[in-house]
Amino acid sequence: MFTYLNDTIVAISTPLTGKSGIGIVRMSGPDAINIADKIFVSKDNKKVSEFNSFTIHYGWIIDKNNNVVDEVLVSVMLEPKTYTRENIVEISCHGGQVILKKILNLCIEYGARLAEPGEFTKRAFLNGRIDLIQAEAVCDLINSKTEQSANVSLHQLKGLLSTKINSMKTKIVDLISHFEAEINFPDDYTLELSLNQFIDQVNILIAEIDKLINTAIKGKIYREGIKLAIVGKPNVGKSSLLNCLLAEERAIVSSYPGTTRDVITETFNLKGIPVTIMDTAGITSHYMDSNKIENIAIEKSKNAINEAEIIIFLCDISSDISNDDKIIADLVYKSGKKFLLVFNKIDLIKNISDCLQKYISAIQIEKNIEYCNVSVLNNIGIDNLKDTLYKIITEDTNSFPTPDVTDTVIITNLRHELLLKECKKNLEQSIIAMKNNESAEFIVFYLNRAINNLGEITGEVSVEDILDKIFSNFCIGK
């Protein structure tokens, strides 16, 4: 993907599916005002080129034959104080797809080019309004599934991570300055930085990097969420549990075993963490002898186990242990995934404790495994199930603060994590070089590499292929 900053781009910036009251066509570039002059007639007969910046005007879009296309509002934003630091015109029209596409095509006919995915934000980055961390945060903010994940992205968009990265770069530059003087003036300068002082200062930087890296697990969970599979034999209440967690009737529920034939996937908010639930078909020991459709459904259930990061193994505590339960337990254990054992239908039994021990012993489950007792039908134990799930999801982190309006800095991007780890390696190499009494050039070499690693995160040091990959994940029009 190549970006030319001397042309004008246009795109529909509102969703392209369904209907809405308002739709927006956005233009950015040197000819945006000129093109708008040709297709917009204002109520007071003024041209767009006469409008002041950050003003909105009522009028009509017309085609080349002076036919009215739509009644609109036109917003004008003049460079450099705009999202892209270019002239921007936004046309707010009625949200029908026919109208939106007509206005889009008119802009193209008069010289605009259809924008590529993420090109408006890429221009904002290339024109220096935002850095690469902030550009990535824009995409993450659009794709946020919970308020908390949106807050994480918003913090990065505000520049909190960028400020941290730039602060570390400044400290490394300060270290380099000591050695540069020795390199350039070997006869006139004696290094004032002792070995211990150098090691202490670099270790402080490494500790800051480690602190950021340690947030990566949390960041990944907030950004990408968790995949959760509900598995069990037929008719144990898997679909009912899905509906209960979603608080809506998403899956068909029936007392007839085998109602679910395909994997149903939905997402719900678990204390700020987006959890994608996969409701699977019931797994039976005799499925190879059953009909072809059921075989396919059960194979999809097995694939869901492999795809999930956490598994809910749902059992019917009111019925006797079966060979199906043992086979499913074996599948879950062999997957190596985290799982939660959930006993459903506790409202149908009197002595829960005895039944639990019998069930756990029969399927050979470890004593310290996490389990919950619920009655999905009566909504009993569901809050405890959610609390236990949250505990399992977050147990690999030292703490899991809920990001709000505080200054929490969390790494959400694998690219950032890998570059920070590479930066740490180069800083460690600089310490080794210093301890081995190597020349200042070698020490500066590793320190400069560390600065380049940090520069790649913010985009100061960038590769076109990396930029293309990042911005290709955006929607067109942003």
Image (spheres, rainbow, N blue to C red):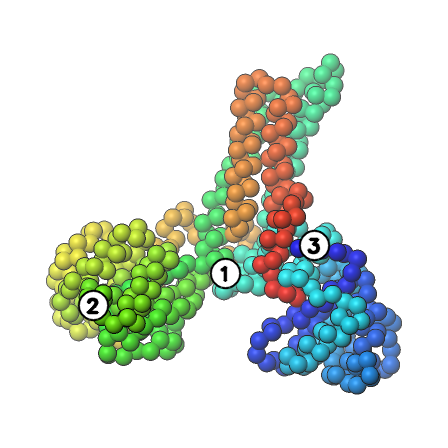
Residue 327 picture location, percent across and down: 21, 59
Q: Amino acid at mark 2?
A: Asp
Q: Amino acid at mark 1?
A: Gln
Identify the residue at image location x=61%, y=31%: 447
Q: Residues within 10 Å of mark 2 (few under 14, many from 20)?
A: few
* Of the pair 27 and 130, the residue shown nearer to us: 27
Residue 444 visible, this angle: yes
Question: Vertical placement of 285 versus 107: above or below?
Answer: above
Residue 196 picture location, percent across and down: 55, 22
- Disc count in the image? 3
Question: Vertical placement of 106 versus 308: above or below?
Answer: below
Q: Which residue is mark 1?
A: 148
Looking at the rendered image, the quarter that the N terminus falls into is bottom right
Circle 3/circle 2 CB separation < 8 Å: no
Q: Residues within 10 Å of mark 1 (few under 14, many from 20)?
A: many
Residue 423 picture location, percent across and down: 56, 37
Circle 1/circle 2 CB separation < 8 Å: no
Labels 1 and 2: the sequence-earlier one: 1
Q: Which mark is residue 289?
A: 2
Q: Amino acid at mark 3?
A: Phe
Callout in the foreground (1, 3): 3
